Amino acid sequence: ETGVTQTPRHLVMGMTNKKSLKCEQHLGHNAMYWYKQSAKKPLELMFVYNFKEQTENNSVPSRFSPECPNSSHLFLHLHTLQPEDSALYLCASSQDRGLAHYEQYFGPGTRLTVT
Amino acid sequence: DQQVKQNSPSLSVQEGRISILNCDYTNSMFDYFLWYKKYPAEGPTFLISISSIKDKNEDGRFTVFLNKSAKHLSLHIVPSQPGDSAVYFCAASAGYGGSQGNLIFGKGTKLSVKP
């Protein structure tokens, strides 16, 4: 595998379910990000991890719970979601956060539908 | 309120002609700007960037122009090719690291290049 991978690619879950999204980067980067892209809206930053430490939580509801066990893996644990949480969830990585100018590399995303 | 605006949701161009995608921003603290390209079912991929100390950056068929006084940047693709058909996102950041270094994205412009 190369680049940034995300699994699953598609997920349908009920509002009472618990599921997890997985992201893995094979680029040797130290910073990882979760973004949400809703229909007709810009990408919204959710969480930032730098060297496994969470450095940003962009006022995300607690029903979204990130986990970063190491610099290569990032998870987004989902529980009791709402239909309005249906969106494309994108993971990204960059070399680190020391310089904002490092380009971010994105995974293909997980298309989440909450029923 | 959106800090990065791409006011044209879509653009259609004939193969071989120039494509011009526009982006406006409101935050005068932004000092670095990026363009990403996204194909269906794939994550955004970095295309080209420009620092606020420059007014032009060129990479092959792609040129980004920055007009700081107008808070406007544009991406020129010459000549346009059918493979350029994708959604193009403009993004901006302010400063190094921390929250200011987060990328703020526009909603995207869908470019269609017709043979």
Image: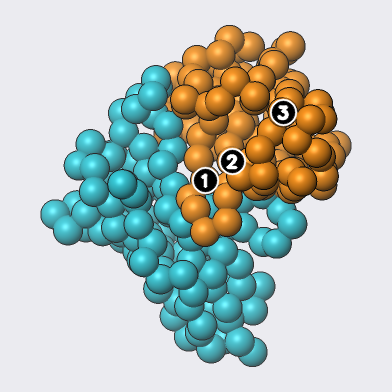
| Disc 2, SS | strand
Placement of A76 over or under B37, stated as above or below: above
**Residue pointed to by mark 1:** A43
Q: Quadrant of residue A79?
A: top right
**Residue pointed to by mark 2:** A36
Q: Chain of mark 3?
A: A
As measured in the structure, the alpha-carbon distance from the residue carrying label 2 to the one carrying label 1 is 6 Å
Q: Quadrant of residue A1?
A: top right
| Residue B34 appears anywhere in the view | no
Q: Colour of chain A?
A: orange
Question: Which residue appears at 47% of the width and 25% of the height?
Answer: A59
| Residue B95 appears anywhere in the view | yes
Task: Give a yes or no on whether discs 1 and 3 share a subunit.
Answer: yes
Badge 2: how crowded within 10 Å, few (<14), some, or many (20+)? many
Q: Are marks 2 and 1 in contact (CB under 8 Å)?
A: yes
* Badge 2 amino acid: Lys
* Badge 1 amino acid: Leu
Placement of B61 over or under B27, stated as above or below: below
Left or right placement of residue B70 versus residue B11 in this view: left
Q: Earlier in the sequence, mark 2 or mark 3?
A: 2
Question: Which residue appears at 52% of the width and 59% of the height?
Answer: A40
* Badge 3 amino acid: Thr
**Residue pointed to by mark 3:** A80
Q: Residue furthest front?
A: A16
Q: Earlier in the sequence, mark 2 or mark 1?
A: 2
Q: Quadrant of residue A73?
A: top right
Front position in the image: A30 or A109? A109
Q: Colour of chain B?
A: cyan
Location of residue B96 in the rendering, given as x and y in whole percent from the top left corner: 35, 24
Badge 1: how crowded within 10 Å, few (<14), some, or many (20+)? many
